[in-house]
Amino acid sequence: MKAPIPFIHRLDEADERLWLEQLSRQMPDESILPLNKLSDAECKMADIAVVANPDPEDLKRLPNLVWVHSVWAGVERMVNELDNPAFRIVRLVDPELSNTMAEAVLTWSLFLHRDIPDYSLQQQKALWQPLPYVPARERTVGLLGLGELGKASAERLKSNGFNVIGWSRSQKTIAGVECFSGEEGFESVLNKSDILVCLLPLTQHTENLLSFESMDLIKPGAKLINFARGKIIDDEALLYALNTGRLQRAVLDVFAIEPLPRSHPYWTHPKVSVLPHISAATSIYSASQIVAQNVRNYRMLNILPNTVDLQLGY
């Protein structure tokens, strides 16, 4: 008898319904159920769970789990909340998500590259004043993080004429992109980037990576985009860099606390663009397809997708 697959999450009822409908449509041979619909016997049988930032206490009801499949690309909250889990964790790797992120990185890089904030300010002042144009080939965009999202973003930027460089924890190779790693490589990317884009996962090594110390290494007058996680940036360090002119502008889509509190200075800062965590929304349809294929590979071939290294956090 095939064990049911529990769907464990902290979503509202409407989102739960959407996910259950799509997961069930993509896996008609499986029984996908909310945890509260499973009997104690079914909980003991379950070897797979599909999750969205699950409560660790809920996972304890499933003593024979082999692996869980997150429907999010970021799994840092789950990794931090779990204490030496016996099961493996699979995060979502979705080409559709990578494409959406690459689109967002290009969009907001162009927003900064073509001086849109400055022209918007000039419009408010009824000021007719063309600004000097810089060709994309003379504009260096530096990417922090060269995983699936970073690679797709680098290729999209490159195809639009930008000079692209990037940094990652381990050395990567991307055609037409100068790739760096290590501490010296990190400093090089900060020094050289006209637009710095953060796409790193949040781990114990990347929390507050962009601190007062690293802000001092950023190319004077550079612009920053954070589409990763809010806690990678020290808010006070960023505000200081903006206020002193070290950074010219920041586009922020992620924050240490979300939604961003109404009293936060980012909302009214003249050099900050605030976005409501929309740079790369997960597609329920494509994510469910990927989860379904990974479950089939496990059921039929006993093959697990790549799993998260708990020491690295991704």
Image (cartoon, helix red, strand yellow):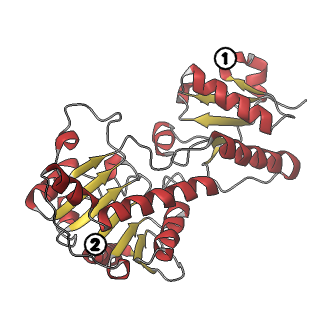
Q: Quadrant of residue 254?
A: top left
Relative depth, front residue between 159 and 115? 115
Give the residue at mark 2.
Answer: 194
Kindly identify the residue that appears in the image at 75 percent across and 49 percent down: 294
Where, by quadrant of the figure, is residue 6 drawn? top right
Residue 312: which numbered mark, if any? none
Instruction: Say which residue appears at 22% left-offset and 40% top-offset.
Output: 267
Kindly tell me whether residue 308 is visible in this rendering: no
Q: Amino acid at mark 2?
A: Asp
Residue type marked 1: Asn
- Dividing the picture into quarters, in which one does residue 250 lie? bottom left
Q: Is residue 186 left or right of residue 269?
A: right
Q: State the image coordinates of residue 13 (x, y, percent, origin top left).
A: 58, 20
Question: Crowdedness of circle 2 by 10 Å Cα count: few (<14), some, many (20+)?
Answer: many
> Which residue is labeled 1 in the image?
36
Give how far across and how far down residue 170 sits, in percent: 48, 72
User: Considering the numbered disc 1 on the image, is that residue within a helix, a strand or a loop?
Assistant: helix
Horizontal side of residue 236 vs 49, given as left or right: left
Residue 258 shows in this picture = yes
Q: Foreground residue, 253 or 78?
A: 253
Q: Residue at x 50, y 56 (%)?
A: 101
User: Residue extending furthest left?
Assistant: 244
The reply, left or right, for residue 43 in relation to residue 172 is right
Residue 145 image point, x, y percent: 44, 64
Q: Along the polypeptide, which appears first: circle 1 or circle 2?
A: 1
Circle 1 packing at 10 Å, graded few (<14), some (14-19), many (20+), is few
Instruction: Say what secondary structure mark 2 lies in.
Output: loop
Q: Are marks 1 and 2 in contact (CB under 8 Å)?
A: no
| In-front residue for pair 151/309 | 151
Q: Position of residue 251 (x, y in %)?
A: 30, 53
